[in-house]
Image: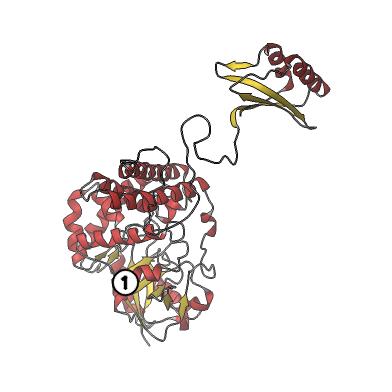
Amino acid sequence: MTRRVLVLPHTHWDREWHATHATSRARLVGVVTDVLDVLEADAAFTGFHLDGQTALVDDHLAVVAGDEPRIRALLAAGRLTVGPWAVLADSFLPSGETLARNLERGLARSAELGAVLAVGWLPDSFGHAAQLPQLLARAGIDHAVVWRGVPASVGAASTAFRWRAPDGSTVRAEVLVGGYDVGGHVPTDPVELVARIADHVGDIGERLVGDALWPQGGDHQPIRRALPARIAAASTTSADADLELVITTPAALVERPADDPGLPRWEGELRSGAASNVLAAVASTRVDVKAAAAAAEIAVERVAEPLATLRLPPGDPAHRLVTMAWDLLVANAAHDSTCACSADATVADVLGRYRAAADIAAEVTARALAGVHDGIDDREPRVVNSVHRARRGVVEVVVAGEGPLEGAQVLEQRAAELFDVTVPAAMVAPLLDRVRTQQVNDTTWVTGVDIDETAELVTVTARCGPEPASRLDLATLRERAEAVLAADPARPVRIRAVQR
């Protein structure tokens, strides 16, 4: 029986990773230009997938704006595909709302360009959240392509499966057996090329459902100009191997029945390392990036945007600022960005975007809350609920002023650290000679001194307050300190001053 093989030429483009976005974009221009030139010049090159993210089109057009008509024409002809995402995101670290905005932006941009790819292309995300079928189905997408995370019980049985989200939404998922770069190398010898593809189909064996997929591409790979000629030359040999080779795009997968009852089913996340590494360690790399991401997403998603929507008129500039903040969060959702598995320069750019999003959120929040005290006589703190449901919780408030807040119950007082330094014992004796008064400055006096010692360290803690202590004997304290230091001159001394 002749097996049909769908050859999927593509490039997988990490917008920033071991190189910064600025560097990658400069390199991308040449790759996209070659894609356009080849597709326009060679009608036999019937399809090329420009990865699953519309950001690549925008990155290219930011440099070569005049290429937009060329891109639109090839998209309309079905010979170029892109999307449906804005970026190829990690699906565990960003919030669910960030993932939804990512797909929303990708679909909107695809529609603007004239062609929407109704396939959730997910070639390299480090596993997949359980809710992705729900997200895709809500957008009218019934098909997905995955690689990492597919469990052995599914991957060992079939090259396609019905993937079900917790809410019951399902999509048909095709498995990239061997990865998205299994066809990265295209031999020049037709016999060798057919043998390579035949080996791939043979490895799949009885698991194969429908036409076999042979993704021809890889990380940052350019278009292979000679691919149609090599496929044509190989076709004379492939007939003997019972193979039919066809160049196409992921759009061809939409023709497959989405609700095929014969497919195995899987419900929940895809996080198995049975067939490919899910790189689970990226969830804990660069905790500073993870903390910045969470803070920025909460500030934008749960505070600034809801308050701007509730309290500001539709034409207020704050709404455009919120959109800009979301653009930053979506850009950072890319799997190599938010996962922080990148070069230090790239991580610095990622942190800069999170900081900018948080800064925008702070300004929008302040604008939305301006006048919240209007009509209220007192100036006591007010707590504003920014979500559309009643809730309870603990709120921390910083109140300017002196002494306890009127009407407040003081549960705990924390000492303010004025300084904390550890020095060799030899440096302390000259300092003791200079201590002649309790007064530190115009508003602070030393009210008590504690000297604690262990075998490794001497700790001197000066307690300070707004009034002098009448019974503090500096001479006695100095003598005791000198005795402790003399007992073991090798011990370092930690000197602290705390404000009570």
Along the viewing direction, whichever of 316 and 97 lies nearer the viewer: 316
Picture residue at 50% right of the left edge, 40% below the top: 407
Left or right for 36, reference 270: left
How many tags in the picture? 1
x, y percentage for residue 178? 46, 69
Tell me the quadrant of the picture where the N terminus can be found.
bottom left
Residue 454: image quadrant is: top right
Q: Residue furthest bottom?
A: 1
Task: Residue 153 in the image: state x and y as whole percent.
Answer: 52, 78
Residue 117 falls left or right of residue 92 = left
What residue is shown at x 49% (from left), y 36% (from top)?
Answer: 406
Looking at this rendering, what residue extends furthest in the right direction?
Answer: 487
In the foreground, 498 or 31: 498
Residue 373 vs 83, above or below: the answer is above
Relative to 9, residue 392 above or below:
above
Label 1 crowd bin: few (<14), some (14–19), many (20+), radius 10 Å: many
Q: Is residue 420 left or right of residue 403?
A: right
| Residue beneath disc 1 | 141
- Image spot of residue 123 (x, y percent): 40, 65
- Picture coordinates of residue 103 (x, y %)? 32, 62
Residue 159 showing in the rendered view: yes
- Report the amino acid beneath label 1: Ile
* Vertical comparison of 371 with 387: above or below: above
Quadrant in which the C terminus is drawn: top right
Q: Look at the picture and state if 134 lies above or below 436.
A: below
